[in-house]
Amino acid sequence: MEVKVEGGGEFCDASYEKICMTTLRDISLESNIDSVYMNCNAAEHVFIISVKIGRVQSPITVSDMTIKGDERLTVTTETYVPKLLDLLWDRYGEKVEQISRLEIALKIDDDEMQKLMSQVVYDPRVDLNTRILDGIDRILPEGARVRQPIRSTGRITIIASENPIKEEWKENAKAMLSKMTKGDL
């Protein structure tokens, strides 16, 4: 994970680089993030931070974590069992019985069982975005509570200030994103 901070002076930039690295490592994001760019403008009290999302695990389906049997599912990956049970109980209610730690009985027909096997139990990307936003919230100064997201594919970019967000700042953030996309930053 590469971190680059500009605009705050040598001491400020180095401090924010360390804060970014430590914070994102503490919440186990360093393997999912390619780069972080932050621009600090202390004079206007505006901060722009952009996180480029890297590798993300594919969504986990019922068939990824179970083996289908006759009216049963045998769990092969225990990690997401609580999410699987939540999905099953929500969808089928009384038709679901957890027989043991790794065995789940289902009283549903074959067509419904086939549909169930392709259902997503857990999508790491949803969790990843939430964790990245949590990390950004920890990195940005406490007083910078006025936030404006800038949409882009594969990135999460936030403008933060203690003042209302100006159009000029939005344009600067968009220009910064354009440079990042071209590889200039």
Image (spheres, rainbow, N blue to C red):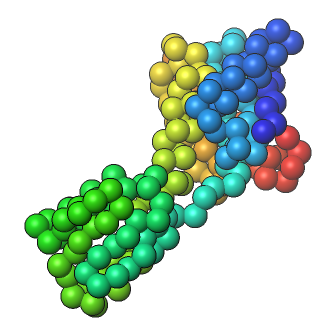
Q: Residue furthest front?
A: 100
| In the image: residue 100, left or right of residue 53 | left
Quadrant where the image shows the N terminus: top right
Q: Residue at x 51, y 64 (%)?
A: 59
Give the image quarter of residue 33.
Answer: top right
The total of numbered circles placed on residues is 0
90 over 169 or under it: above or below: below
Tell me the residue at 61%/44% (across/down): 156
Point out the image quarter for the C terminus: top right
Say whether residue 107 is visible.
yes
Say if 9 sits above or below 180 in the image: above
Q: Position of residue 176 (x, y in %)?
A: 76, 41
Q: Is residue 41 visible?
A: no
User: What's the residue at 79%, 32% (across, down)?
Assistant: 3
In the rendered image, residue 183, in percent from the top left (x then y), is placed at 87, 49
In the image shown, does 35 or 70 lie closer to the viewer?
A: 70
Q: Position of residue 169 (x, y in %)?
A: 64, 32
Name which residue lies at 40% across and 65% down: 75
Q: Is residue 74 above or below residue 174?
A: below
Position of 26 with respect to 97 (left or right) is: right
Of all residues, the one furthest to the top in this rendering is 11
In terms of depth relative to the viewer, which is nearer, 108 or 8?
Answer: 108
The picture quadrant where one finds residue 104 is bottom left
In the image, 164 versus 134, the foreground residue is: 134
Q: Is residue 173 left or right of residue 10?
A: left
Residue 184's spot in the image, x, y percent? 89, 45
Q: Residue furthest left?
A: 94
